[in-house]
Amino acid sequence: MRYYVLTLFPDMIQEAMRHSILGRAQEDGKIKLETVNIRDFSHNKQMHVDDAPYGGGAGMVMQAPPVYEAWESVVSRIGHKVPVVFMTPAGKVFNQQKAKELSVYPELIFLCGHYEGIDQRVIDEIVTEEISIGDYVLTGGELPALVVMDAVSRMVPGVLGNETSAIDESFSGMYLEYPQYTRPPEFHGQAVPEVLLSGHHENIRKWRLEQSMRITEAKRPELLKPELMSKEELKLYRKLQQEKEEANKKEANKKEL
Ligand code: ADE
């Protein structure tokens, strides 16, 4: 995977991508990162790349020509079109499914905006996809681009090292992680669940699946999609639903008394 990030703050991107798994993935050549400083394409001595908005209003708008030329400097080198992801709160909200979809491309260009936005004409011309990382407004697209690159990179084969890790944590659906434990075996009077010490891989797998489903049901029930579940998951899901119904009935009875 090759990332090209068009930004006014290349150091912010390079620095954040230098660490841990993403740093190692770059050393191993699984991921390549190139930042393009939009300011290098300024058309004036002061190196400005923004101007006041037509029609008035607060703030400054990033000008179309430097953004376009930064993009062109990448595509003219690559020689073919690459998806251009514009980070904006107006985009479609990012999720794991989108991370998986993006991870299939060999190259991605990220466009990070600043100030009050980017001239609409260059957005219309080069952007193929608009992505938001959530319903809040940040000062720029750099942190959102980093969030997306992080999530996409861990779906790229070889990046996590252990090939099963990315798949393992979500089973067939998008479940929340089961609880993890490591040494010491007892902490503040709390023991590690017995099954994890048993060495019985199949029982451990089943226990983890059940925990994942229970945690998802308790914290994010909207993530449970029975239509996507395997037979085993569906059986567990029905058990959880039944338990919930019984708990609700008990609660209702208590109130009547
Ligand atoms: N730029 C500013 N806020 C953003 C957000 N929430 N998502 C993506 N890009 C943004």
Image (cartoon, helix red, strand yellow):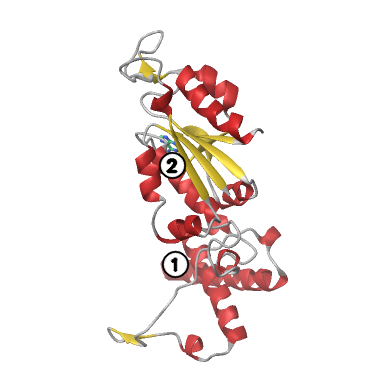
Q: Mark 1 highlights which residue?
A: 256
The x and y percentages for residue 251 are 46, 68
At mark 1, the secondary structure is helix
The x and y percentages for residue 50 are 37, 19
Q: Nearer the viewer, residue 102 or 212?
A: 102
The x and y percentages for residue 206 are 60, 79
Q: Can you say which quadrant of the picture contains the C terminus?
A: bottom left
- Residue furthest toward the left? 188
Q: For ligand 1, give the image quadrant.
A: top left
Using the image, determine if residue 60 lies above or below residue 189: above
Q: Nearer the viewer, residue 148 or 14?
A: 14
Looking at the rendered image, the disc whose residue lies closer to the viewer, 1 or 2, is 2
The numbered mark at residue 54 is none
Q: Is mark 2 within 8 Å of ligand 1?
A: yes
- Residue furthest toward the front? 77
Identified by mark 1, the residue type is Glu
Q: Nearer the viewer, residue 91 or 194?
A: 91
- Residue at 53% over, 54% down: 153
- Residue at 43% over, 23% down: 41
At mark 2, the secondary structure is helix
- Residue at 60% over, 69% down: 164
Q: Earlier in the sequence, mark 1 or mark 2?
A: 2
Using the image, determine if residue 74 lies above or below residue 249: above
Does residue 19 appear to the left or right of 201 in the view shown? left
Q: Residues within 10 Å of mark 2 (few under 14, many from 20)?
A: many
Identified by mark 2, the residue type is Pro
Using the image, determine if residue 194 lies above or below residue 218: below
Q: Residues within 10 Å of mark 1 (few under 14, many from 20)?
A: few
Q: Mark 2 highlights which residue?
A: 144
